[in-house]
């Protein structure tokens, strides 16, 4: 839809990747099919710029990068990554915290590529009583105040 919502953006990208894979879409048709699924402001934007991108070497990866640059700017990426880094359980239940952790972890893929770091980051965000229950020694990072 072209909204400045990184969750919807990531969901759309994941949906497109899944769709293109499941239908075994040929490489030369991927941009046409993916752009067909654009709606609202994103569709209007694409109609105005697509002429600039109709070279034979304009791949789906380049299309996704073009969309990222337009609808998911670096400042927004950094904001979501920061939300992940400073996520704390607070008043959430463990289940709510785990869901929020998973949602935000996709905005910091390079930080969660290591299962060890991902697990450590999850436990650091838990309230102290749960850290204690699992025998985790909290670090100073666990008590950092959000920026």
Image (spheres, rainbow, N blue to C red):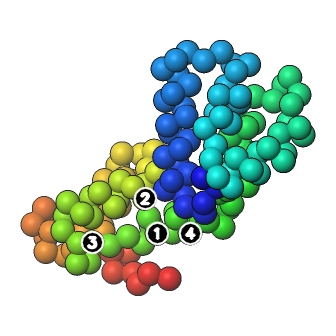
Q: Is residue 110 left or right of residue 131?
A: right
Q: Is residue 98 left or right of residue 76?
A: left
Q: What secondary structure is found at the residue carrying circle 3?
A: loop
Say which of 66 and 45 sits in front. Answer: 45
Q: Is residue 99 left or right of residue 70?
A: left
Residue 32, compared with residue 134, is above or below; it is above
Q: Which residue is mark 2?
A: 104
Q: CA distance from mark 1 to mark 3?
A: 12 Å
Give the residue at x 84% y 25%: 57
- Badge 2 vs badge 1, beta-carbon distance below 8 Å: yes
Mark 2 / mark 1, whichever is N-terminal: 1
Mark 3 / mark 2, whichever is N-terminal: 3
Mark 4 / mark 2, whichever is N-terminal: 4
Q: What secondary structure is found at the residue carrying circle 2?
A: helix
Image coordinates for residue 9, horizontal then vertical, percent: 56, 51
Image coordinates for residue 113, horizontal then vertical, percent: 45, 44
Give the residue at x 69% y 60%: 73
Q: CA distance from mark 4 to mark 2?
A: 11 Å
Residue 124 location, quadrant: bottom left
Residue 1 in view of the camera? yes
Image coordinates for residue 143, horizontal then vertical, percent: 33, 80
Q: Residues within 10 Å of mark 3 (few under 14, many from 20)?
A: many
Q: Residues within 10 Å of mark 2 (few under 14, many from 20)?
A: many
Residue 139 location, quadrant: bottom left
């Amino acid at each position: 839809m072209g909204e400045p919502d990184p969750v919807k953006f990531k969901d759309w990208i994941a949906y497109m990747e899944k769709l293109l894979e499941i239908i075994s879409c040929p490489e030369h048709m991927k941009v046409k099919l993916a752009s067909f699924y654009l709606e609202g402001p994103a569709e209007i934007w694409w109609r105005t710029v697509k002429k600039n991108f109709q070279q034979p070497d304009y791949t789906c990866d380049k299309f996704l990068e073009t969309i990222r640059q337009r609808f998911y700017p670096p400042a927004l990426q950094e904001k979501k990554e920061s939300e992940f880094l400073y996520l704390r359980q607070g008043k959430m239940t463990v289940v709510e915290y785990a869901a929020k952790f998973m949602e935000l972890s996709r905005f910091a893929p390079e930080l969660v590529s290591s299962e060890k770091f991902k697990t450590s980051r999850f436990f650091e965000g838990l309230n102290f009583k749960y850290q204690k229950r699992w025998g985790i020694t909290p670090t100073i990072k666990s008590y950092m105040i959000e920026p």
